Image (spheres, rainbow, N blue to C red):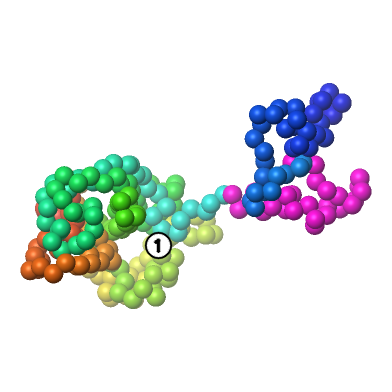
Amino acid sequence: MAEDNPKHGMGEADYEKDDPERETLTTNSGEPVPDNQNSRSAGPEGPLLMEDYHYFEKMAQFNREEIPERIVHAKGGGAFGTFTVTNDVLSDYTMADMFSEEGKETDMAARFSTVAGSRGAPDTVRDPRGFALKFYTEEGNWDMVGNNTPVFFIRDASKFSDFIHTQKEVPKNGLNDPTPQWDFWSLSPESLHQITTLEGSPQKRAERSDPAVGLLVALTRVAPPDHDAIQRARHPRLVAHDERLQ
């Protein structure tokens, strides 16, 4: 009960007097909060007042503190590590410091994910796999994203949102429906190449490629072009072969 709590009704300033080492609670703008336990109202039984800026700021943060899952690539796992240049093949073509010399190490993070499934979706479904890298270079962060397929379902980006909607769970029941998926694919002939890649099985799960999607390598040095080196930079592969079961 209130009578049994000696600190009941105390403001933040009172707490600070009671505990001098207590950190000061502030608003988003840095203003100290005088009372974090009681709202301002028009009298003991009246409505809350709009002048109680701390209350409304507190409730606004509460309403928005749950971050919704991302639309695609919601389920994934990652790890932090180090990128090491083992063979200097790019320093003649780019000014990027992380490729400047053999043995150069750069902190990085990698994330592997599914695409269409939600955070609770199984890992066993037929779905492309995402592959993202973030390099924490001395010149700033560099992000590289990709899928484990060299092609994609659509040619025109304006179809992307429509395509994703057909691959997600039906909002009405939370289940996957193959009908809208195949309707979209059958009406988009450019998706055929990706479908055959998606529905085919590699002979070994370890034998998969992860080409970067939409990656642009800027050539900032004048030198004879080494197209093989540039191609390796644009399309990194985990292994040399990606054979499929017949």
Q: Nearer the viewer, residue 164 or 5?
A: 5
Q: Residue 137 placed where, x, y %?
A: 30, 51
Q: Residue 40 placed where, x, y %?
A: 83, 48
Q: In this view, does 195 lie above or below 155?
A: above
Q: Quadrant of residue 214?
A: bottom left
Q: Mark 1: which amino acid?
A: Gln
Q: In this view, does 241 lie above or below 228?
A: above
- For label 1, the crowd category at 10 Å Cα-Cα, with few meaning under 14, some 14 to 19 and many 20 or more, is many
Q: Which residue is drawn at 30% across and 68% down?
A: 153
Is residue 58 visible in this depiction of the protein?
A: no
Q: Residue 106 placed where, x, y %?
A: 26, 46
Q: Magenta includes 63?
A: yes
In screen coordinates, is 175 left or right of 156?
right
Q: Nearer the viewer, residue 121 or 12?
A: 12
User: On the image, numbered disc 1 is attached to which residue?
Assistant: 167
Q: Name the chief secondary structure element in magenta.
A: loop
Image quadrant where one finds the C terminus: bottom left
Label 1 secondary element: helix
Is residue 8 visible in this depiction of the protein?
A: yes
Q: Residue at x 40, y 49 (%)?
A: 75
Q: In this view, does 177 lie above or below 45?
A: below
Image label count: 1
Q: Residue 77 placed where, x, y %?
A: 36, 44
In screen coordinates, is 193 left or right of 61?
left
Q: Nearer the viewer, residue 163 or 8?
A: 8
Range of residues picked out in magenta: 36-65
Q: Which residue is drawn at 18% across and 59% down?
A: 233
Q: Magenta includes 146?
A: no
Q: In which quarter of the image is residue 142?
A: bottom left
Q: Which residue is drawn at 31% across and 55% down?
A: 139
Image quadrant where one finds the N terminus: top right
